[in-house]
Amino acid sequence: MSLPAMVGTSSTLGIISAVTNGRRKRALRDGEQSRAASSAVFEADRGRAAEKKTLSTVTFLPGHTILRQGDQGAHAWLILAGDVEVFADDGVGPMRSVARLSSKQMIGEMSLIDNGLRSATVVARTSTTCAEIPRGAFTRLLNACEPLARYMLLHLINAVRAQHGVPITSPAVIGPDIRSTDDRSRILERRMFGPDATIFREGEVGEAAYLIQSGEINVIRGDTLIATLGPGRTFGEIALIRNAKRMASAVVGENGVALEIIRRREFDEAIGSMPMVLQSLVQSYLGYLVGSVSSDSDLDATPLLVPEAIEF
């Protein structure tokens, strides 16, 4: 390019320079914002990593009692290596063995979730190394769930406790408080049923679960009454979680009943809101309860396989 041409384009060069400087400033500003965001993510990750590093590990010798039925719970244990045996005392005869657990399985979490007493005694069978999980970890997991999901988890824990002959805790949430966290104005569908009405029959496909507001429900398997449920209790959820047919019939008691109806979509959304470790616990509790109902003999609890990348 000739000198005159270059001089003639001085204004153009000025414009280009201004644009370039503007782009450079924006790039610097964007870079600073990006570094700030990356720093925030890094600090958050480092905070989570530091928290995970605070989880202490303990090795128990064979025969050591790790948890004792009836005690208050301050923490749970994640088994890293070794084997333990779980014993339950129902007040009739000696303690009985109900499960053997090993690596990647959790013990002692129920009393952290519902603030109840320990429901079983756990003894190390071999040299067993465990990571201590503090109560605050489970509080954070529960706070991440829909209210309905928390309630269902507590209900399953109560059912497991009852199966062990351990006193159950009072319902933590009843009625209109069980709502979606995305829609606080919505309550579940409520209906009244007269005495002796059949809510569902054994062998039917399950499309809803139910929460009792008032009255009673008789749960009947074959010709046998296996339970009578009152206000604050839920029923019908096992068929939804397992995507299976009803294991028993539900019949209204003599004074009628008021029910909140939890449709499958609402139920699936609530369960889906659970962190993976809580979903794993739900499957574990269901496996134990279904095994107990379908057999006269004691069965080992379904193993709880904690996901490899789970963060507390």
Image (cartoon, rainbow, N blue to C red):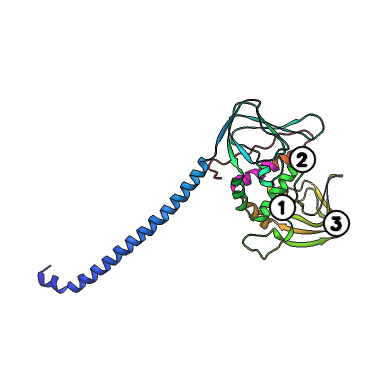
User: The N terminus appears in which quarter of the rendering?
Assistant: bottom left
**Eyeballing the image, is 120 above or below 247?**
above
Q: Earlier in the sequence, mark 2 or mark 3?
A: 2
Q: Position of residue 261 (x, y in %)?
A: 74, 58
The range drawn in magenta is 275-285
Q: Which residue is mark 3?
A: 197
Q: CA distance from mark 1 to mark 3?
A: 28 Å
Going by the numbered disc 2, the residue's amino acid type is Val
* Residue sitting at x 21%, y 72%: 12
Question: Is residue 149 shown to the viewer in this render?
Answer: yes
Question: Whole-Å distance between the Cαs marked 2 and 3?
Answer: 31 Å
Q: Main secondary structure of the magenta part?
A: helix
Q: Secondary structure at mark 1?
A: loop
Name the residue tied to disc 1: 172
Picture quadrant of residue 294? top right
Give x and y (percent) for residue 129. 58, 31
User: Which of pointers 2 and 1 lies earlier in the amino acid sequence?
Assistant: 2
Q: Which residue is mark 2?
A: 166
Q: Quick check: can you spot residue 81?
A: no
Name the spot of residue 251 as percent of width and height, x first. Answer: 84, 53
* Residue located 71% across and 55% down the image: 173
